[in-house]
Image (cartoon, helix red, strand yellow):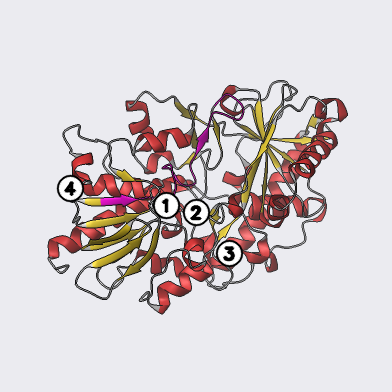
Amino acid sequence: MSMLTKDPLRSALGRPLDRRRLLTAGAVLAMASVPYGALGQTSQPDVIVIGAGAAGIAAARKLAEAGVSYALIEAGRRVGGRTFTDSQVFGVPFDMGANRLDFPEATPLPALGRGSGFDIAPAPEAGRLYLGGKEARDPEYEDFVGVVRRAERAIVAAGDAGRDLPAARVVPDLGAWSASARFVTGPFLRGRNLDWVSTVDVSRAEERGVANVCRQGLGTLVASLASPLTVQLDTAARSVELGGRRVVVATGRGNLTARCVIVAVPPSVIAAGKLRIPLLPPRQRAAVERIPLGIFDHIAFEWPGAPAGVLPDETIYFRTDGAEGYALRTRLGGTSVCALEVGGAFAERLEAASPQAVRAVLTEALTREFGADAARRIGRMHRTQWGMEPLALGAMSCAVPGAGNMRRAFLEVVSGRLVFAGEHAHESLWGTVGGAWQSGERAAAQVIALLKDGRQG
């Protein structure tokens, strides 16, 4: 049986994974003696952390481990942000958001999870290609991988040369596989069509290779890491004032004050005016507006008709003829639940469609790829709508053309008091849970240094 020896997303550039050295991961040990909860119960904390997604959780843990008091506030009624595991829809764990831990060696998440009894395993490294209901032949695999490699190389070459252009402008005509390559390098990897992807942003991103999956759900794992913390749920931050001696964060439950603040919410939320930062400098304001979140959704469904021999959590690719590309994740967590993966403009259109229309799209896709009999075995269905989620307004960040250098603004301390965190605030691991976690630890370290300098009053 033919299989890709490497996932085409990993091999697309033909370069080793360590093309750029990964940032050193944070310490793995979480000392049981750390008073995580107590340090979050003070009425006058040293630091306010806005957002209890992966980045905010990582930041609060790091602060507590350093003995720094914090207030971790979350607008929603749960923690985890864009990592969220649901067990109600299908009766088994299903990750509504991020479902893979890319770069597992770059964070303590796998070790922390295994230490708490989570079943964490490598995701299948190989991807499969199906054509006409059957696995592709070796020549077809070679064609597919070849065009993806050429497309990605063209994008990266332009970015490395400092040509910050729409990625679509530098991808050559790739013949019959052209639309497939554009889907993989755009909506599937970045949540945006290539017209809205910066070549420089792509060139600075690490290649995704080995990934981990969590059988209990990645969202469950991330949420568990918040359990020792004190989290103020249903507490939406409305504004951040930086002008006085202390930071003032206005919330629906009153004002909070602290010496510093870590803003761990998606840039799209700030750009939409849901969190106002009146004194945000033009450099950071531009980054907020020009590094929005793209859309990536799962159309999950029960499907006992999955092709024989496919592995749990495997990816199946198809030839794409037009702009409406998709991939298939099979047997999620070893169950009968699969997911049609869509991104970019196609996903945005589906988010506005009725559930019946989305089911029709799913049925048409499975009929096309596997036949009408396979499509008839579709059971319950659930689709995500991350572009409409008010606390996210998208799935993953991606700089627009001309803004490939702007992520650096998210790494800087603002007015001596404010630091950003989130996957958007990582130059090379953006779009990943590992990048979000690393950014949270980095932001905490920056704040701890500021507090030690004693410049925060």
For residue 66, which numbered disc appears in the image? 4
Q: Is residue 405 visible?
A: no
* Residue 279 locus on image (x, y percent): 35, 76
Residue 44 percent coordinates (x, y): 18, 56
Q: Which three-letter amino acid code belongs to the residue tagged 3?
A: Ala
In this figure, which residue is indicated by the disc labeled 1? 75
Q: Nearer the viewer, residue 160 or 390?
A: 390
Q: Amino acid at mark 4?
A: Ala
Tell me how far mark 1 sits from mark 2, CA to CA.
8 Å
Depth order, front residue of 185/60: 60
Question: Which residue does the numbered mark 2 point to in the structure image?
Answer: 391
As drawn, 279 above or below 431? below
Kindly identify which residue carries mark 3.
157
Q: Position of residue 375 (x, y in %)?
A: 81, 30
| Span highlighted in magenta in the image | 71-92
Determine if the magenta segment contains residue 260. no
Q: Quadrant of residue 295?
A: bottom right
Cβ–Cβ below 8 Å for labels 1 and 2?
Answer: yes
Mark 4 crowd level (few <14, some 14–19, many ≥20, 10 Å Cα): few
Residue at image x 58%, y 66%? 198
> Would you identify the image quadrant in which residue 4 lies?
top right
**Residue reaching furthest to the right:** 372
